[in-house]
Structure formats: C-alpha cells, structure tokens
Amino acid sequence: MASTGVCLFPARLPSVIRQELTSSSSSGKSKFNPISTPFRRLAAVSTDHTPTSLTTVNIGNGKASEKDAHTTTTKSAAETKRQAGQEEKKLDAEEQGLSLKDYFEQAKDFISSDGGGGGGPPRWFSPLGCGFRLDNSPLLLFLPGIDGTGLGLTRHHQKLGKIFDVWCLHIPVKDRTPFTDLVKLVERTVRSEHRLAPNRPIYLVGESLGACLALSVAALNPDIDLVLILANPGFLMGNLVTGLRRPLPQTVEKLSRDLLASTSYLSALGDILPRETLLWKLQMIRSASQYANSRLHAVKAETLILSSGLDQLLPSQAEGERLKRTLAKCEIRTFANRGHFLFLEDNFDLVTVIKATCFYRRSSTHDFVTDYIPLTPSEVKNIIESNRFLTMATSPVMFSTLADGKIVRGLAGIPSEGPVLFVGYHMLLGFEMAPLVIQMFEERNIQLRGIAHPMMFMKFREGKFPDPSIIFDTIRLLGAVPVSGANLYKLLSTKSHVLLYPGGVREALHRKGEEYKLFWPQQSEFVRMAARFGAKIVPFGAVGEDDIGELFLDYNDQMRIPPLKKSIQEVTDEVAKVRIGVGGEVGNQDVHLPGIIPKFPGRFYYYFGKPIETEGRKQELRDREKAHELYLQVKSEVEDCLAYLKEKREKDPYRTLLSRIQYQVRHGFTSEIPTFDI
C-alpha cells in the first residue's frame, strides 16, 4: 500500500512498543521488527503499510547443560505425567486470555506517550500476542468501538492469532477524523490486501461504532469477499438515540457500568475517553448510523451479529434483529447476560463462536473438513461441564473389544490411529452422542467427527425451525460435517475417527415400540469408501433411551392432529433433503419433535464390537456383492451389540440412579460405579 508520509512512531515510544530497525536484503527497505517482553504484546504499524513481521524473543540463553539433558532422558513416568499436567494447566491459562485489568493497563500505556495514542492519525497495528498463525490464514481487521484504542480484542489475541493475520485499527484520543474518512482508510486497506490475495476472505470484526464502519466498507465493496463479525452494532434510528439523548454524566455512568469498571479503572477510563473525546464519538455514532443505514441494501457480505442482552449504551438486541431481517446473508447470536463491551467480558470466547457458527474459512467457500479447527482444552472442558448433568444422571458405562476378541470395560479396544469408521445405532433424538463423544475425549483423547443432517449447517431465516444456535452450535464445534460422499471421503483421507449412523433421522425420530430397531438403507457405499482408505470399521450399539423417557406422542400421533401436521410439513420444507431418490422408510423423513415423558433416570450402556479390517480389501470390495456382504455383516454386528447390552443390563445392580447415588455416598463421588460382570 502507498505510504501517506506520516511519521508513524512518536519520539518516545510507549512501553508496549519495542522498536528495532533491521534491513531487508530482498527489498532494500528497512522494517520494524518488534521484540516482545514478558508483559508487552503490541507492535505499531502505519496507516497504510502492512504490519511488519513479529518476532518473539524468549528471555534466557536457551542452552541446556549435559546434566539437564541426562535428567531429561531419565525422567520417571510420574515426572512426565506431572509435567504434562503442568503443561495442560499452562495451556488452559493461556486460553483464558488477558483480563479487563490487562486491557486498561495496555490502553493507558498505549495512549500515554506523544503520538502513541494521544495524537497522530488513525493507524494499524498487529499485536505481538497473536503469535504465529496457520498457513494461508485470512486477514482479520479489527475496527474498534468508541474507545478507539484497537485493544478491544486483547482477551482474544492469542487464539485469534493462531488462525488469522490480525490487524487492529487504532484511533488516537485526540484524533478527530470524520467517519467518512475512516471508511476510506479501511477501504484502501481492504482493496490493497484483496489485490495481494484475491482468493482469500477478509474479515472485518467491529464493535458498536466499528460495526458501522465494517458495514459501510462492505456496502462500498460488494465484489470483494468480506466476512463481517459485528458485536452490538452501533445503529441508532430516529428516537432510538437513547445514548445521545441522555445527559453526558449518565452516559459515562452507564459506559462505566458496562465495562464493569471498579474504582481503580475509572482514571484509566478517563484517559481513554476524556469528556471531549466521548462527546465526539457519540456524535460520530449518529453520523455513522445514518451513513451505514442508507447503504445496507448494498451489503452482500456474509455477516454474523453478536448481540448483548444487557447493553446499557445502545439498543443492541433490537438493532441486531433488524439487521438480520435486512441483510441478505446474516446470522445472529444473542448473549443474554452480557454488556455492551462483549469482547472484554469474562468467559466470552470469540474464536469458539466463529468456529461453532462455521464462519471460519480460508477460501471463497467454507470446507467442513479442511477449514475445521480442532477443539482446544478449554472448549473440551466447557463441553464436558455443559453435559455434566446428563453424564451424572445416566452414568454411562462402555465396553470395547480387543483384537483377540476379549471384551473389556472402557475403550481400550478402540484403534488409536485413523482412519476409523464407527457405525452404530441412533437413539431417540441422539441421546447417546454427548456421553459417547465426551468419554472418547476423556479416556482416549480421540475426537469423533460426526456425519450429520444438513439442517444442522443451514443458515436459517425466520421460520418454524428452532433457533439453530441452541441446537446445533456445539455439534458443529465438535467437528460434525454434513452427510455426503465427498465429506466422508475427506474425513477418511485425513485419517479421522468418523461417526456414522446409517439409520439417520429415521432412527433418531423413531416411533413407539421401535426402540433399538435399525432402519438402514440398502446402499452399502460407506463400506467401499472405508476400503478405499483401509479404514477400520467399528460396529457399536447403545441402549438406555427407554431408561430415561417414554415416547407418548410420536410422528404417527402428530400427523393425526391437523395443527401439528401442518407445523411438521412447514418445518420439513425449511430443511434440506438428504436422501433424494431413496424410497421407503429410510428416505427423507419429516422433521418433528416427539413427545417424551421423562423417567427416573436409568443408565446408558455402550458396546463397541471388534474392529473390522478393510486394509488390503480395496479391490475385493469394489465388487458390489462383496461390499454388500460386509455391509450386512456390520449391520448384524450392531444388532448383536444391542442384544448383548439389553440382556446384560438386567444384571446390573446399579442400573437405577438411587443405587448409584448410594454407592457413591459410600465410596466417594469420583469413584467408578461397578456394573454387570462381563
């Protein structure tokens, strides 16, 4: 990008910036090579130039003595385990990001020097805390809200930096650049970076005022592949300008409350937003809203709106819903107990939201396999905690089969190396999935990639179908992909552990008296696909749905009730068709929610049969008859797994919840509860 000729660094750099001039042999141009210190994470760059490469320097000489080396090679297993635990704690701590205190400290340091924030023009910087990113990572431009520091993503820098090239826009406290000129600045950057990498998307992440800026740039550049992520968009229409109608002290009070600012932060808040600057920013929101609102019809970018339910400054929820109805490609997620400054809130993880909504991609289209980002330790922990009640209520017990045919409790018989294809029975509403996925994580550190109905990945408009954020975000975060031959091919080619339910929706929405009955199609395509990659096929069964609930209003019952029949037909029309051309019971099923009467919880049981090898059988299983024989074998073994569990659970003295509670009272609540003899 062309230089503006403005001096980018002040005479005295703030302590969050370290400057080192180096010479580039390839270009002959000098560049700034920021060096991080343990507590400083920012590097400043120009209004137009690309952020320079960031170098992290570790404190210490990096050398190990011979004694240290010997000690390393003779570590005990206990020591190795202890260090592994410490490393996991370190990773957990790193994933938590920085605190609100860190934000204020960095912001105060950033604006404390001449030009470092107090004066000078708006400019980009790339945080050192972002570290090293994945290859071909898309560019993420953060557009700040009324604080203008560009540090609004402080708590997310580390995780964002692993999957994005992150630039942040800094608008100095004393700067009075009009909104339209800010639009031009961002637009120049977008156009320049698009020319450098035309096949990769550019993400515009904005909060409040920054959201107006992002939408304005998107409206002016409909032919550039932009992805917008907007937190509490600062749009104010007519008499909704509540923030501007309040007296200034009231606005500041609400702003402070939204920041959760204690007395110790108020002075820093005054440095970031002195009275004159705050008044300027609030007036700018008015002009920004008018500018962006008049151009919403031209926005073609894929948009994700994040709305807070407790925003004290702007009517974010109402505006989010309005934008969802107005924009062509828009989804919304609402966070009921969050305030205006969503990105600075505890326990809000922007990367997790982006992953769960399938908004992360490296090219023009989202690829559910190659664009998937594996779960982090904190995400695994959150998923486990969110399903803790179900796990406690059902006390899942799992069995697997070793290579010699021996049945053991636990998952020791599950192959560690992929590709592995798990083929099993779908309980009512998929009740078995959460405990299965969780225990596979906890016991074997294996992530199952499920093959799921396409409706779990659709971008829904207003309709009869429930809010997908409630139902499907966790499933997508776990790595599920829409059912298709292409996606199964990609998963197996990447040596994944894949979870497949041939019975699909028909099994998960079965009728009365159909518990543990398989509804599989005639096609045996997954067998030949598995053989193509030498995947192991693991048949399995799971029982226990009849121990937690009784189906009293099934599909047949609901189709006899006109209002319910109409609702089922409307919902089914909204969702995708999976098995077009497949007739019979396993064809495309109507989508409905069965009526279930809860029971006093029993127990879930899982049994994984002996893995079936397909390695070396690629040519043999190209023959349709041979493939169908193996298909029927897999189906028969799944039925055998179900029959085994149904018989054995009758001999489990701890099948009931009360008996399990009594056992844990005697032996401790972390003790493993026994079951039937194998």
Image (cartoon, rainbow, N blue to C red):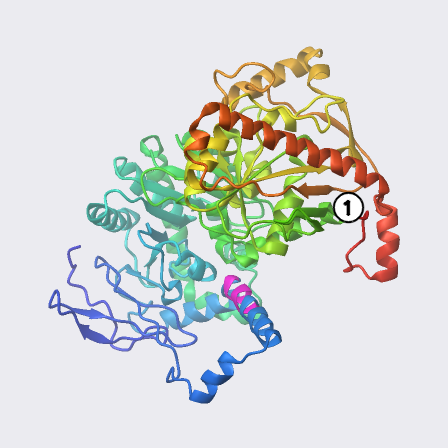
Q: Is residue 222 left or right of residue 260?
A: left
Residue 236 sits inside the magenta stretch: no
**Badge 1 is on which residue?**
393
Segment tinted magenta in the rendering: 89-95
Task: State how many labels appear.
Answer: 1
Is residue 335 visible to the viewer in this orientation of the structure?
A: yes
Please tell me whether residue 335 is drawn above or below residue 81 in the rendered image. Answer: above
Residue at 58 percent of width and 20 percent of height: 586
Give the image quarter of residue 673: bottom right
Please tell me whether residue 622 is drawn above or below residue 38 in the rendered image. Answer: above
Name the secondary structure under disc 1: helix
Q: Amino acid at mark 1?
A: Ala
Front-most of residues 124 and 86: 86
Q: Quadrant of the N terminus?
A: bottom left
Magenta: predominant secondary structure element?
helix
Residue at 37 percent of width and 64 percent of height: 131
Q: How far across and down, in percent of the image, does residue 645 sit?
A: 75, 38
Give the image quarter of residue 486: top left
Q: How far across and down, in percent of the image, does residue 149 sit?
A: 38, 61
Residue 92 sits inside the magenta stretch: yes
Q: Is residue 381 left or right of residue 169?
A: right
Q: Is residue 358 left or right of residue 192?
A: right
Residue at 11 percent of width and 68 percent of height: 28
